[in-house]
Amino acid sequence: MPDLKPNSRSFRHRIAHGSARWVVCVAASLLVTRTVAEEPAPAPLTRIADVLALPKNRAALALPVRVRGVVTYRAGGIDFILQDDTGGIYVNANAAFTAHRVSDDDLTLFRTVTEGFEIELEGHTNQGGYAPNIFPHTLRLLGTKPLPAPVPVITRSDWTRFLKGAECSRRVEVRAVVQGFQSYYDEKWTLFLNANPGFFIAQIDRAVCADPALLVDAEILLRGSASSHFNTRGEFTMTYLRTNEPGDLVIEKPAPPIEKVPWVSLEDLQPFHPAPPVSHRVRVHGTVVFSLPESFLYLQDGLNAVRVETNSALVLNPGDRIEAIGFVDMTREIGMLRDATILKIGSGVPPAAIDITPEEIIAINQLANSKGQMARPHDFDGHLVRFRARLLAVQAGVSPRQPQHRLLLERPGNNGTVLQANLLSGPAGNLDALRPGSEIEVTGLVQLAYGPHKESSFRRWPTQMDLILRGAQDVSVIQAPSWWTARRLAGLLGVVALLLAAVIFWSLQLKRQVHRKTRLLAKEMSARRDAAVEFQATLRERNLLAANLHDTLLQTMGGLGFQLEACEAEAETPAPHGKPPVHLAFARRMLDHAVDELRNSVWTLRSMPLDGMSIPEALTMIASRLGTGRETQIEIKTDPDFPRVPDFIAGNLLLVAQEALHNALKHAAPRTVTLELRSLPHPDRISLTVRDDGSGFNPGTQQTAADGHFGLLGMRERMDRLSGSFHIQSAPGQGTTVHAEIPLRSYDEDLTDRPIDEPPPAG
C-alpha cells in the first residue's frame, strides 16, 4: 500500500497533483463560459432578402431561418417558392425530406401547401445550385392571402435585371410575343417568347392555356415567378417564368390571321430600321430548291435564298412555289425563318445550278466583310452551285442525327482544305461505289459556316463551306482514279516490305534453329561417341582384369584349396588329446566362400551382351546367373519383336539391369523381381524397368559414392551419357522400381567400333 500519511511524500504529491487538476478544470470552465458568452448562437434570419444576400460559403453553414410569407408557386413534389415583402426564395422541401429534415408527420402538411397560402417556415440556409435557398424543418399554416403584386418589367434596366436572373423567385409581369411552344411532360407547356430586347421561355400549367397554338404570334401579358436555369458550376444560363394561375396570362393582342401577316422579300428579312426589329411573324414566298419534311427547306427568289425551319410534314419538290410564314432568326449568323407554316401555291422550274467554286464563294464573302459591304452578287448561302473536286472518302451515317452519306472532297490547289457534301435523305444510289481519288462534279446547296476573324476575335466571317446534296444524282464521275493510286502503291510496298521482313525473320530464326540443333546434335553425338568409346575401353579393361584375376588370384586360391585339402587329409590322424583340426575346417570354409565371391566378381566383370545373343537372351542369362542358389523368383518380360540395338547401347543397358538386379537381391530380400524390357510406342526409344517387392527404402537415404558405393551413381551416369533418363521409386515396405529409358539414334550403328566379346566361363 502507498504511504498516505499527511507528512508522506506520496500524500504531498497527490495533493499537489489534485490541486493542479482542479485549477485546470476551473480555468477551462471559465474559458468555455467566456467563449459561450462572447459567441452566442446566431439568431434566425427572418427576412428573405437577408438569406439571398448571404455569400455562398455563409449560406452553406446551415444558418437558422424563420420566415413568414406567401406561397407564389408550387413546384414539383413538395417544393415551392415563398415571397415576403423583401424578396422571393426557393424552398427545397424535397431535398429536406430526403435528408430527414422533414418528418413523416409534417409531410402531409407540406403536401397541402399551394399558391396563396400564408405560412411561417423554420429551417436552415442552403447554398443551392445558383442562389441560396431554404431547407425547411417545420411550417405553420397561417391562412390564405392574395399573391404579391408582380414587379412590372418595363424599362431597359428592368429587362436587364430580369434577363440576367436578378429577379429570381420574385413575381414579375412582362409583355412579349409568343414565337413558339412545345409540350413539357404531360402537365405543362413551354412557351418561347420574344420581348424585344431579349428571348426567354415560360412554363405554364395546362390549366392556364389549353391550346397554345392560339398564342403563336400573339402579344401577351404574363405574370409569374422568375426562375433561373444554371449549369453544374452554379453559373446562370437563362431566365424563365413559371406560373400555375390561369389569370396570370392575358392575351393583349391576338395573333393576326395568316392572311394578315405582312409580306417581306427574302433580302429584307432583317433590314436596318431606326425602330427595334419586329418580333412578329413575316410572310415570304419563293421557289423550293430543296426540302426535308418536318425539318427544313431552302427557298429561293431571284438571287436571294433563305433557310426555312418547319415542323410541316408537307412533301415538296424542287420547283414548287410556296409561302412561308415564320419568325426571323439570326442564330446561324445568316437570317432564316423558324417555326414556319408552309402553304403551297403552285409549281414551276427549279432554279439552275451556278458554276462557281468554293474558293470564289469564300473570297467574295471575306472581301465584302473586310470592306464592310454586302457581298456581290450574293453570299450564295442556300444557292445551288456546281463545281469539280477530288473525292477523298465516302462515309455512311452511323446515327439518325448524322447525314445518310457524307462525301469528303478536296479542291485542287486549295491548300489541303477539305469540304463536305452531305446526302441527308433518299437512296444512296452509286455513292457507295465511288472510289477515292475520283474526279467528280458535284451539285448542291451552299451552307456557309462563320468563325472568328484571324485578326479580330469578335468579328465573324465565312470560314468554311459545305454542301447539301439533293440526291445521289448530284454527283457524277468525270474521271475514275488510276488503279495504281498512291494509297494502293503504298499498300503494295507495305505488303512487300512486310513479306520481306517476314522472310528475313524466318531465315534468321531458321538459321538460329539450325545452329542450335547442330550444336545439340554434335554434343549428343560426342557424348554417345564418348559413351561408346568408354564402354569399349571399359570392357577391354574389365576383360583384362577378369583374365588376370582368373589366371592369377583365382588359380592361386584354387591351388591353396588343394593344399588345404592335403592338410586336411594329413590331419585325419587323430590329434593329441583327441582335439580335431578345427582351424583347418574353418579355413576351408573361408576359402570356399572367397572363391565363390571371386568367381562371381570375375563373371560380373566379364558379363557382356550379345555376341550372337539378343538383349532378351542376355538379360535372361544375367537373371539366371545372379538368381542361382536364391529363393527369389526372377521374371523376365520382353517384347517378342524387340529391335536390334547397337552393342554399346545394349551393353550399358544390360549393365544397368545387372546392377539393379544385384542391388535388389543383395539388399532388399525380395520374393519376386520383375525385369521388363520394352520398345516404346515411339519407335526410337527403349525402356528397362526392374521392379522388386522387397524391403524398399526412403530415396535420399541410400549410401552414395561418398560412402564407397558407386552402383546408383554409375547407372545414372550411363543413362546421362546416352541422353537417356533414369528414375528410382521406393518406399519402406513397398519395394523398389528402377526405370531407365534410352533414345535410339540413326548414327548409333556408326559409333560401334566392333562386336563385344562374349563372357568367359564361370569356372
Image: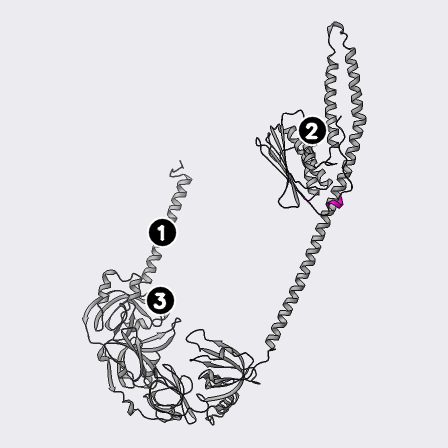
1 and 3 marks in contact (CB < 8 Å): no
Earlier residue among tags 1 and 3: 1
Q: CA distance from mark 2 to mark 1?
A: 107 Å
Rendered image quadrant of residue 276? bottom left
Left or right side of 637 for 163: left
Rendered image quadrant of residue 43? bottom left
Q: Secondary structure at mark 2?
A: helix
Residue 492: image tag: none
Q: CA distance from mark 1 to mark 3?
A: 35 Å
Earlier residue among tags 2 and 1: 1
Is residue 59 or residue 211 the one in the foreground?
Answer: 211
**Marks 2, 1: nearer the viewer:** 2
Image quadrant containing the N terminus? top left
Question: Which residue type does callout 3 highlight?
Answer: Ala
What range is drawn magenta here?
Answer: 740-760
Residue at the image point whose x is 75% and y is 42% from the top: 532
Q: How many neighbours does mark 1 have within 10 angstroms: few (below 14), some (14-19), or many (20 or more)?
A: few
Q: Which residue is mark 2?
A: 625
**Marks 1, 3: nearer the viewer:** 3
Q: CA distance from mark 2 to mark 3?
A: 105 Å
Earlier residue among tags 2 and 3: 3
**Residue 227 appears in the figure:** yes
Measured as percent of width and height from the top left, residue 740 is found at 65, 39
2 and 3 marks in contact (CB < 8 Å): no
Q: Secondary structure at mark 1?
A: helix
Image quadrant containing the C terminus? top right
- Find the residue positioned furthest to the front: 641
